[in-house]
Amino acid sequence: MEIALYVIILIMGTVFGSFLTLATYRIPLGQDIVHTHSYCPKCNNKLGFFEMIPVLSYIFLKGKCKKCHEKINIRYPIIEILTGIAFVILALGLRINIYNVFTIKGIEFLLGVLFIVFLFLIAGIDIEHFVIHKGVLIYGIVISLLNIIYQYSFFSNYNLYKVIIYLIAIAIFTILGTFRIKKKAKNDYVYSLIILCLIINFFTLEIGTILTIILALLIISIKSLINKILNKGKKYNNKIPIAFYICISNAIVWITIFLSQIGV
């Protein structure tokens, strides 16, 4: 029975991954992500049911649109698979089974799922557009508040001082970022990064956040060095999607922690 449960979780993760690929494409364009039917960005052909099955559709269609034969980016099935794996690791780390899935463990799993979605959205949009979308940040703040309600409701030793400091910090940097927008500042990316790190800190605690930032800086430094070596004397896009690397690094730290909990 537990194998069946984890297969369902894996499938659920790939479905979420399929939605995330849609969301990261449409959100920066201001398009609806719920009601508008899935379509090919090239020929606008509405996708049928068998064209929207996570991973399998990509394989059956040989990575091309059924109508215009435009190549489908390989990142789509990769994101679907990674999201499925992330859901399974989360469930394993929380020791989810058929007996506790509808208990407090189920709530923890749901909050973890919401956080995974947040990381994927921030990373996916930033790698494409070099921007941290404000709507996604608001979503991150909302799920943080849900986590606060959960922690306060079920744990008597919950640290309210940490929550107050967290909320004040979020408010300050949100106001500062909004002020910069009103003043037509060219870039409020730094303020958004700080809010992103605060949200991550609330879900992975201080040590997880510190490890995330260290790992992100290490990855960015190595990538920048490789780019300089490969593009010596040439012009290249030197913009760095810092939020993308922070989210990826946090996912690595987060997965490492959960794998250690299950003895892997």
Image (cartoon, helix red, strand yellow):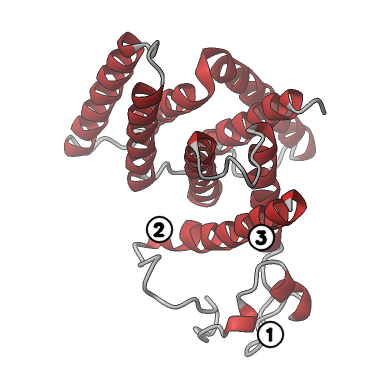
Q: Is residue 126 above or below residue 67?
A: above
Q: Amino acid at mark 1?
A: His
Q: Quadrant of residue 161?
A: top left
Identify the residue at image location x=35%, y=35%: 146
Point out the tag, 1 or 2, that comes first from the N-terminus.
Answer: 2
Instruction: Check the image and report above or below for 16 versus 221.
Output: below
Q: What's under tag 2, amino acid-wise?
A: Ile
Label 2 residue SS: helix
Observer-nearest of 255 and 169: 255
Crowd band around label 2 with a 10 angstrom C-alpha radius: few (<14), some (14–19), many (20+)? some
Furthest toward the front, the residue is 99
Disc 1 + disc 2, Cβ < 8 Å = no
In this rendering, the answer to whether 5 lies above or below 164 is below
Amino acid type assigned to the residue bearing label 3 in the image: Ile
Residue 11's disc is: 3
Q: Please tell me whether mark 1 sits on a helix, a strand or a loop.
A: loop
Question: Can residue 235 be seen at all in this image of the molecule?
Answer: no
Dot 3 surroundings within 10 Å: few (below 14), some, or many (20 or more)? many
Q: What mark, if any, has residue 69 been given in the picture? A: 1
Residue 187 in percent (x, y) is at 34, 35
Q: Residue at x 69, y 62 (%)?
A: 77
Q: Nearer the viewer, mark 1 or mark 2?
A: 2
Determine whether label 2 and label 3 are within 8 Å by CB.
no
Residue 184: x, y in percent? Answer: 21, 39
Compared to residue 186, the image places residue 218 above or below, namely above
